[in-house]
Amino acid sequence: GCRYDRRRPVYRVQGRIFIQKNSCPKEPEILRGVLFRPDDILIVTYPKSGTVWMQEIVPLILSQGDPVVVDTVPNWDRVPWLEARAYIQNLDQRPSPRVFITHFQYNMMPTGFLKVKPRVIYVMRNPRDVFTSYLHFSRMASYLVSPGTQTEFLNKFLDGKVIFGSWFDHVKGWLSATEQHIMYISYEEMILDLEASVTRMAQFLDTPLDSEMIRKITDRCVFKNMKKNKMSNYSLMPSTMMDQNVSEFLRKGIAGDWKNHLTAAEAENFDEFYRKQMKDVKYTFVWD
Ligand code: A3P
């Protein structure tokens, strides 16, 4: 099952803070008492849906393309996880607009968040690719439960017996949050047209960017360039935590890699489960 270990919600590596990912926070008491500000920006993702990508893009939008922050501050410090809140220094002293990231499901968000309604960018990814990325990630990250065989991990994934629970619940929950101030975007849209995606995000964040700035940001954030940024590619993590010889964190960076991994039977099983789970969802996903 999937239980939140309150004693160890996060851990430290060389003074850096990481979420204790081997847990599934159901009652995130850790968020109680967070004083949200109306101009906070919250990036929300299900794991493996483009988290670190957003930790690159949003700071570059806010700095209007100035790369100093992404070149000098590790992704987990420049856009900290709300889950690691207790360990983030000077959370309340950070200048506005503060940018956070979280994997929490919508129904885990505290009342302060529901009242203040800070801006949210919710990023979704084809769950078949999320699964594929998650499988590789679970093999290389020593602090995660070992995934077992691909089929075993597929069953766990569809059952929501992975950290942060079911992809289906996560996406349906955040899509239902219509009273919040949310921009929805998908990993696939970002792959198809990163310039247009950056433009849309900049508009949502009320940060005017000219076309030169947008080109500059896009160029920094394409997979092959971002992969070289040691402040974003997790090479600062010791290999005892993430063994990038097993699988790199910035692994493939494409849409549709699931086709190279799922067997025909697994894909069919996935489709059937997906159809049942998503039948009442009105949102049109790029991958459908
Ligand atoms: P793959 O394993 O499919 O390559 P998260 O940051 O949420 O854990 O997600 C990681 C996934 O996002 C990985 O997917 C990673 O390669 C991909 N990713 C990270 N940065 C990217 C970028 N600049 N362009 C495309 N994909 C990126």
Image (cartoon, grey):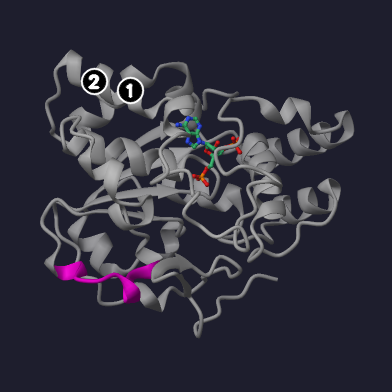
Question: Which portion, as a residue range, is magenta?
Answer: 84-92
**Quarter of the image holding residue 136?**
top right
- Viewer-side residue, 24 vs 57: 57
Q: Is residue 85 magenta?
A: yes
Q: Residue 28 in the image: x percent, y percent?
A: 43, 73
Residue extending farthest to the right is 265
Left or right placement of residue 160 versus residue 113 in this view:
right
Badge number at residue 218: 1
Q: Residue 12 in the image: x percent, y percent?
A: 45, 73
> Does label 2 point to a residue whose CB lies under 8 Å from ligand 1?
no
Residue extending farthest to the top is 211
Kind of residue at badge 1: Thr
**Considering the image in quadrants, where does the C terminus appear?**
top right
Query: Looking at the image, can residue 283 be seen?
Result: no
Residue under label 2:
214
Left or right placement of residue 48 versus residue 197 in this view:
right
Q: Residue 34 in the image: x percent, y percent?
A: 25, 71
- Viewer-side residue, 52 vs 1: 52
Q: Is residue 280 above or below residue 144?
A: above
Q: Are marks 1 and 2 in contact (CB under 8 Å)?
A: yes
Residue at figure coordinates x 69%, y 35% from the top left: 275
Decide: few, some or many residues near mark 1? Use Cα within 10 Å; few <14, some 14-19, many ≥20: many
